[in-house]
């Protein structure tokens, strides 16, 4: 099992952070451009919803993500496909800030893909997670302009 985890502290209330973690239009502002979300069932990030997460670096290969737990402080997704496991988004108040935890636990059943992921893939995933959380913080705190806002 591969476990990757990143945290960020954002100067905003948890309700604001939750909107950016769950609203599809806001997600598009800070999520990695290497990732494509395709809805399968339900609204993105709602309990029971399913979407396909595809990676451009893997010729759009991907896995199905199902929201299995959802409340005002966390989202737990079950992952099934080329990689299998769980993805956790958790957020909680810390004074006038909100701490966001992003944790992914997964395995790669395909031996040829596993070699890539255990090698260089883990480094890229960790870096991408860090960049995403930094982008989320900058956009919410007003220190970064998402591409969509720049064109308005």
Image (cartoon, rainbow, N blue to C red):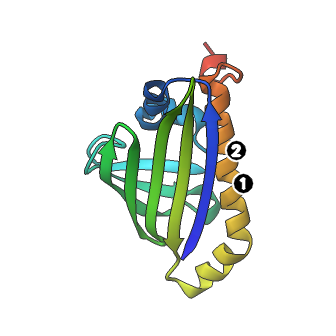
Describe residue 76's horizontal placement relative to residue 53 as left or right: left
Count of number-bearing discs = 2
**Residue 33 visible, this angle:** no
Residue nearest the observer in this picture, 58 or 94: 94
Residues at marks 1 and 2 touching, judged by CB atoms closer than 8 Å: yes
Point out residue 25 in the picture as x, y percentages from the top left corner.
46, 29
**Residue 149 visible, this angle:** yes
Can you tell which mark lies on residue 131?
A: 2
Task: Name which residue lies at 25% across and 51% down.
Answer: 48
* Quarter-of-image position of residue 94: top right
Task: Name which residue lies at 55% across and 47% down.
Answer: 101
- On screen, 47 above or below 66? above
Describe residue 105's horizontal placement relative to residue 42 as left or right: right
Task: Name which residue lies at 41% across and 32% down.
Answer: 23
Point out residue 83 in the picture as x, y percentages from the top left corner.
49, 71
Query: Quarter of the image containing the C terminus?
Result: top right
* Quarter-of-image position of residue 59: bottom right
Residue nearest the observer in this picture, 61 or 82: 82
Q: Cα distance, mark 1 to mark 2? A: 6 Å
Q: What SS does tag 2 mark?
A: helix
Can you tell which mark lies on residue 127?
A: 1
């Amino acid at each position: 099992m591969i476990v990757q985890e990143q945290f960020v502290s954002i100067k905003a209330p948890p309700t604001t952070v939750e909107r950016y973690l769950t609203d599809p239009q806001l997600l598009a502002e800070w999520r990695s451009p290497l990732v494509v979300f395709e809805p399968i069932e339900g609204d993105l990030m709602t309990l029971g919803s399913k979407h396909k997460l595809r990676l451009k670096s893997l010729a759009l290969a991907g896995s199905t993500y199902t929201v299995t737990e959802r409340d005002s402080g966390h989202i737990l997704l079950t992952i099934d496909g080329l990689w299998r496991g769980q993805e956790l988004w958790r957020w909680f108040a810390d004074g006038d800030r909100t701490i966001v935890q992003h944790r992914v636990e997964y395995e790669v059943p395909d031996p040829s893909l596993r070699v890539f992921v255990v090698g260089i893939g883990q480094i890229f995933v960790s870096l991408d997670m860090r960049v995403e959380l930094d982008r989320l913080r900058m956009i919410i705190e007003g220190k970064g302009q998402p591409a969509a806002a720049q064109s308005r």
